[in-house]
Every structure is written in C-alpha cells, then in structure tokens.
Image (cartoon, rainbow, N blue to C red):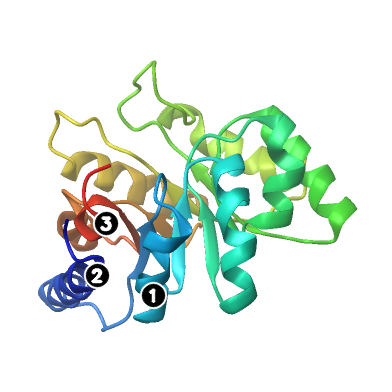
Amino acid sequence: MPNAVEQLFAVQSEIRKAEVEANRSEGSVTLVAVSKTFDADAIRPVIEAGQRVFGENRVQEALAKWPYLRTDFPDIELHLIGPLQSNKAQEAVALFDVIETVDREKIASTLAVEMKKQNRFPKLFVQVNTGSEPQKAGIEPKEALAFITRCREVHGLIIEGLMCIPPADENPGPHFALLRKIADNAGVEKLSMGMSGDYRIAIGFGATSVRVGSAIFGTR
C-alpha cells in the first residue's frame, strides 16, 4: 500500500520542478488531490500533511465523507470534477466550492437558479471535450465560445476557468494547447488540465490547477 503522504510530497515537488521548467512562479499551479473512491480515513492523513484542495467525481459520494471531514478542517476547498446531473445541482451548490463540469444549457440554467436560491456561489468552470469523444462529458470545442457567452449573458454566471480530459491514447499536448486557446479567446483565466500521467506536460501549457489522484492515493 503506497504511503499517500509521501506520494503527496513527491507530487508537490514535481509540480515545483515543472513550474521552474515552464518559467512560472512557484505556487502558480494548484494541486487538486483527487480523493474519489477513498474514504475519510484514507484522506485524513493527506489533509493533516497540509493538502487543502480536493476533487470528487460524484455528489453522493462526497456528501458521505466531506461534511464530516470539514468539521475538523473547515478550510478545505472542494472541487466537483465529475459530470453533474441537474437533479444533483442543489446538493452540489451546497457542498462544493468549485464546479468544474458545466457543459450544457440545462446545467447552466439550473445552477444559476440554485446559486441565487442558496445565496452560495461556487466558482464555475466549463468542461470542454477537446477530443470530441462521444462517451465523454464536455462541450464541443467549436461550441465552447458561444456556450461561455450564453452562460454569462443569458444565465448571469461567472465562468472562471475551463477544464478538459484529453483522450487516454493521444498526446495530451495539443488538447492542452486547444483548451488554452479557447480560454484566451473567451477571456477565461483558469485552466484545470493534467492528471497523474500528464500533469507536468499540462503545467508547460499553462495549467493553473492539476487533478492528481492515483499518483497520491494509489490505484483504486
């Protein structure tokens, strides 16, 4: 069983090296530790080691562990990085600080209503399906700019970032470059890209956050 704390420190060190190689300032990349499928007992040592930003794929799974962990660690920042169904929007707005998977009109309108109702405003990222993979969530790249505009102008949402998951069998570089280009055109500052296998590459392409799970917690 890998030691998650040791692996956390190793990943943090690799991020710092990648920042230097990309001529970026230290601390310009946020590590989102992906804790999906791991229980509170497995996550707690990583929090105690200083990690404060975590990613979860499913609303229900996150609800089972994070309210409990937050009683001891109220400064946790929680990101939803898996697909969001509209019937889970109420719980997602209540629980998450960042929702990275806004990708269609219905979710945008539902989130706008829920955020006003709860007077709670998580940061929002639009997920772009850079590989146009039919099985994957995310807006098509060619539709992304128009969708971001509608999020802002029709739904009154502030879109802070973009997120992508490149196809597993392709060089991720062109996908990261595409996401950055869309972000530049849309006037969006944050880029959530890069996972355990390619986060160093993503940092070179301008990632502001990387989502790392198995390199910290081990395989599920």
Dividing the picture into quadrants, the one containing residue 97 is bottom right
What is the C-alpha distance between the residues marked 3 and 1? Answer: 13 Å
Q: In which quadrant will I find the N terminus?
A: bottom left
> Which element is circle 1 on?
loop
Q: In which quadrant will I find the C terminus?
A: top left
> Which element is circle 2 on?
helix
| Mark 3 residue type | Phe
Q: Are marks 1 and 2 in contact (CB under 8 Å)?
A: yes
Q: Is residue 5 above or below residue 121?
A: below
* Residue 160 as seen in the image, left or right of residue 112: left
| Mark 2 residue type | Leu
Q: Which tag, 3 or 1, sits closer to the chain's start? A: 1
Tell which of 146 and 139 is nearer to you. 139
Task: Please give the residue where the numbered disc 3 appears in the rendered image.
Answer: 217
Q: Which tag, 3 or 2, sits closer to the chain's start? A: 2
Residue at 49% across, 30% down:
139
x and y, in percent, of residue 130 in the image: 34, 33
x and y, in percent, of residue 78 in the image: 54, 61
| Mark 1 residue type | Gln
Tell which of 30 and 185 is nearer to you. 30
Q: How many residues crowd mark 3 within 10 Å: few (<14), some (14–19), many (20+)?
A: many
